[in-house]
Amino acid sequence: MGLQEIAVTPLEFTPSGLSLLPAFPVSACNGLILVAGKSLEIWNPLTHERLKLLRGKCNPNPKEEAFGLGYDYTTDDYKVVVIHDHRLHRRRHGRDNFACQTHVYSLRSDSWRNAENCPWRGPRGPGVFLSGALHWTIIGMDKIIVFDLATENYRQLQAPPLRERDTLNVKEKRYFNLDVLDGCLVVSDFAKTDRTSGNLEHYEYDVWVLKDYGDKDSWIKLFSLEDEECMSYHIINPRPVAFMKDKTQILLQDDGLSWGCSQDDRSGFFMLDLESNSMKRVGIHGLTGTLYAQFIPGTIFCLHDNCGVNGRATKRRRRRLGKRTSNMKMWDTT
């Protein structure tokens, strides 16, 4: 096992009260970050701005809701989408009916409104923004659901041709996650199976890339890992973070947090060589707690601007969106 070191530049941006919140970045768009904790906030790490979103009686709960931040090109407006699954609340009171309500916040109008109910149960976690829409997976299903920010309607996106697995006498833990890598939608399909006969563990990890968004036949398998690589590094739930400059290597982070490693390596980062299919653990020294990494562009967009209600403000925003710098941000969520 090799060890590769990576340099991290501290981000001098810690909003007041953050240490009191179980907050973590849940969705990003054009350099802005949506953060969920006891409240919903939009951050601009480059300008050190934050905007707290008031939600009335509807309090956020990251465990029972799906969130997403995206940009509506048709109206030049940033939108926050929250899918609230009332099925969980009602079951606690003995009722089986459910309703996945969709709430949309408009930065331009600074207001919330209800949209079409989500027709699928179980969307959770951060929404992935791409091509004017937000994307989520469904818990326990190999489905990708899409919320179009212009029409504010749902649709389903064809998933890649995943492996067929023999479920007979098998106990399986499976993670089906979405990311955006180099402007393309990425699916990470990780499964750990324990066969009841013989108690044998088997690992499979496939990463798929949708090269041409909208073309269901353009899914390409980027790489695969199996037993030897996964067991050597105790991988639980990996996901791709970013390509390196020459695109022959890719940085992975294990969201399940690797166990059995030293304190300095507990961040769960790995560098995968796509040509040799070999991995090295990436050490990030001097940081404590649980880390979350995401690759985002920088933007000087002002959260407290006029939000484009007149032509001049709209042009200013568009110019700002064009002035970006690329950075990989890491947060300590302890």
Image (tube, rainbow, N blue to C red):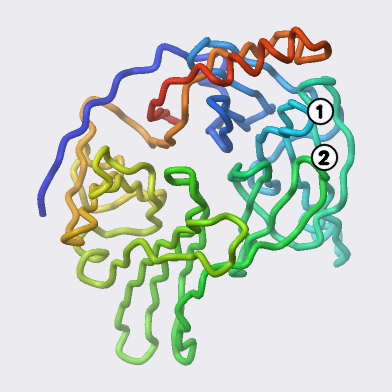
The residue nearer to you, when weighing 300 against 47, is: 300
Q: Secondary structure at mark 1?
A: loop
Q: Quadrant of the N terminus?
A: bottom left
**Location of mark 2 (residue):** 103
Residue 77, percent across and down? 75, 26
Residue under the image location 89 percent in, 40 percent down:
114
Label 1 Cα crowd, 10 Å radius (few <14 / some 14-19 / many 20+): some
Local secondary structure at mark 2: strand
Left or right for 97, reference 221: right
Viewer-nearest residue: 331 or 32: 32
Q: Position of residue 7 (x, y in %)?
A: 22, 26
Q: Nearer the viewer, residue 330 or 47?
A: 47
Label number found at residue 55: 1
- Label 2 near label 1: C-beta < 8 Å? yes
Q: Amino acid at mark 2?
A: His
Q: Tell which tag, 1 or 2, sits nearer the viewer.
A: 2
Task: Locate residue 288, reporting x and y percent.
Answer: 31, 29
